[in-house]
Amino acid sequence: MSTEPTAAPTQTTTASATLLDRASRVIPGGVNSPVRAFRAVGGTPRFIASATGPWLTDADGNRYVDLICSWGPMILGHAHPSVLEAVKDAAAQGFSFGTPSENEVKLAEEIVSRVAPLEQVRLVNSGTEATMSALRLARGYTGRDVVVKFAGCYHGHVDALLASAGSGIATFALPDSAGVPRSSAGETIVLPYNDLGALEAAFAERGHEIAAVITEAAAGNMGVVPPAPGFTEGLRRVTAAHGALLISDEVMTGFRCSASGWLGREGVAPSGAPDLFTFGKVMGGGFPTAAFGGRADVMALLAPQGPVYQAGTLSGNPVASAAGLATLQGCTPDVYERLDTVATAIAGAASEALTAASVPHTVQWAGSMFSVFFRDGEVRDYDDARDQDSAAFRRFFHSMLAQGVHLPPSAFESWFVSASHDDAAVSHVLDALPAAARAAGTPD
Ligand SMILES: *Cc1c(COP(=O)(O)O)cnc(C)c1O
């Protein structure tokens, strides 16, 4: 298999390869999150030594324009001065107290003020924890056990939510995860995304057992698949009619698609608001912090006020909270405008280059999140998303990498940009696209 690009300076990857070797001895697969391992695209994952603005520098000294942005959090760019300052200031005051502290209050206030229907949030350490806790809360509130999710949506590696999940599960074409108890999977109903008919049928049959429907506000973990017109409203209508809660997972879209998230960008009426939200990624600014929240009467069920237990030694960590707060405060209207400009420039040029090279493709959007599917025609659900030419993506990916552009190493992930992607960084990406498109169109 030759994936050598045409016009690229030769990259040395010896240091990354050596680190992968060392890593593989003490860490399964050499990585602490599967998609990082490059298994879907082949080759040596780059071990990043440092990053600033839109640029990554790997252990061999190669530089890349970053189109992963830590899978979303680095919305202001790497090592942004105001976030760095906030982190240093907070760290100087101590790292973790195991008591309440002011930074977590400020972060919670910022989140609640940005997301109109949100009344209360609780801070946790990862998106996975947020969805896991939201699910437990929904079950506690309704006294029901069954949860509905959509194929291709990823909500973290929560047992009940791994069925037909996107992200790494999609990347590696895994049936589902081993180690999930049958009893747990049995309480999950998986339906096709964007299919209200299927939802209505499931509720007609088992509505009295269903605690919640969880959905990505706009799907970004099978590539980007926005909700079809009426889908979000339909979820609200059907869940409300059956006394089930609606959980909108905005871990990826929150504070990225707009100052609040996807639903904020779309302007959902208060009556259409979900009962619970989950957030992560951007709100931690690159540190492990996330949140779930929603209606005060539902949140009131959480311990210590109510009977639903949920806790965390490092939850609301003062340094992570400071990083998240500084990041959110940095997310001004100018930032969102720049994200849109950068995303439009890169997606437009990618499409042009692929068209010129006669490579079938479709670009899809959710705000400034976008992805390129290597297939013709609209992608509405997971079946569509899986029906693409992943070998063409692999060739495209490696050509871009060799030319100094680091895409997500999977055809099932959104591309992420930051407000620090200046004209030089964007030009660097645009210059790489034609050769990558030709590589994509040239089977090995
Ligand atoms: C990333 C993601 C998660 C999981 O968050 P982690 O912090 O990786 O646990 C959950 N839901 C969505 C929509 C995500 O994109």
Image: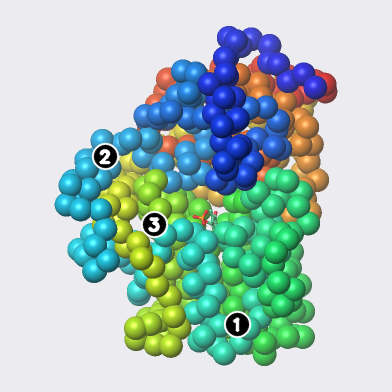
Asked if the beta carbon under badge 1 is closer than 8 A to the nearest atom of ligand 1, the reply is no
Q: Earlier in the sequence, mark 3 or mark 1?
A: 1
Indicate the position of residue 122 as horizontal and vertical percent values: 37, 70
Question: Which quarter shows the N terminus?
Answer: top right
Residue at the spot of label 3: 289
Identify the image quadrant of residue 111: bottom left
Instruction: Say left or right for 391 vs 413.
Output: right
* Location of the C terminus (image quadrant): top right
Distance between the Cα atoms at labels 2 and 3? 16 Å
Residue type marked 2: Leu
Looking at the picture, how far across and down is residue 57, in whole percent?
Answer: 45, 24
User: Which three-letter amino acid code belongs to the residue tagged 1?
Assistant: Ala
Mark 2 or 3 closer to N-term? 2
Q: Is residue 8 above or below residue 119?
A: above
Residue 299, percent across and down? 40, 80
Q: Secondary structure at mark 1?
A: strand
Q: Quadrant of residue 151?
A: bottom right
Check residue 211 in the rendering and tell me which mark sits there, or answer none.
Answer: 1
Residue at image x 51%, y 48%? 367
Q: Is residue 297 visible?
A: no
Q: Which of 426/308 is in front? A: 308
Q: Indicate whether 101 appears above or below 13.
A: below
Is disc 2 surrounded by few (<14), some (14 to 19) or many (20+) residues within 10 Å?
some
Q: Any atom of ligand 1 within 8 Å of the CB at mark 2?
A: no
Q: Secondary structure at mark 3?
A: loop
Query: Which of the labelled discs sits on residue 442, or is there none?
Result: none
256 displayed left or right of 387: left
Q: Is residue 335 above or below residue 201?
A: above
Circle on res. 84: 2
Task: Choose top left, top right, bottom left or bottom right for residue 430.
Answer: top right
Q: Give the image location of residue 112, x and y in percent.
A: 33, 67
